[in-house]
Amino acid sequence: MAETGATPQRSRQAPMTDEIAAANKSLVRRFYKEVYIDWNMTLVDEVVSPQFISHDWPEGGPTGPQAFRDYYSAIRSAVPDARYEVDDLIAEGDRVVDLRHTSCCAD
């Protein structure tokens, strides 16, 4: 392949910084607390994308914030004292991974 001398286009996205990674982790912690502990589903509309797809649910299932709310509302109905607490997060670039969390409920 011949070289054209053109330089590759640079991404127009701002580079990820430690501050952005920390802010992303903070948002995930807030999400866990408000949604999975306090069961405040209002935050779901604010942060869950309309294109949200759960990789835990059957393929081709419902998507988006409403599907998320419906799924976790069913969980809460079945196990009203269920709680999910973040134990460890990893952030790199624009991704945050819940490395370890605790799920619990009363007997």
Image (spheres, rainbow, N blue to C red):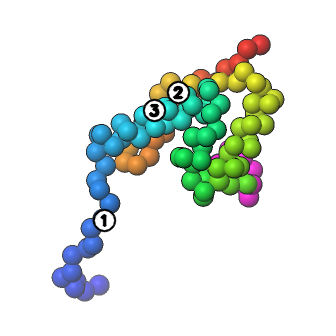
Q: Earlier in the sequence, mark 3 or mark 1?
A: 1
Which residue is situated farthest in the top direction here? 107
The three-letter code of the residue at mark 3 reads Leu
Label 1 near label 3: C-beta < 8 Å?
Answer: no
Who's the residue at 30% across and 65% down the image? 12
Residue named by callout 1: 11
Disc nearer the start of the sequence (1/2): 1
In this orientation, which residue lies closer to the viewer: 31 or 25?
A: 31
Image-based side of 2 in relation to 98, left or right: left
For mark 2, does the 10 Å Cα neighbourhood hold few (<14), some (14 to 19), or many (20 or more) residues?
Answer: some
* Extent of the magenta region: 53-61
Badge 1, how many Cα within 10 Å: few under 14, some, many 20+?
few
The rendered magenta stretch, by its main secondary structure, is classed as loop
| Residue 58 counted in the magenta span | yes
Marks 1 and 2, how far apart at CA: 33 Å
- The one nearer the camera, 29 or 66, is 66
Residue 41 coordinates in the image, percent (x, y): 64, 38
Q: Amino acid at mark 2?
A: Val
* Residue located beneath label 2 in the image: 86
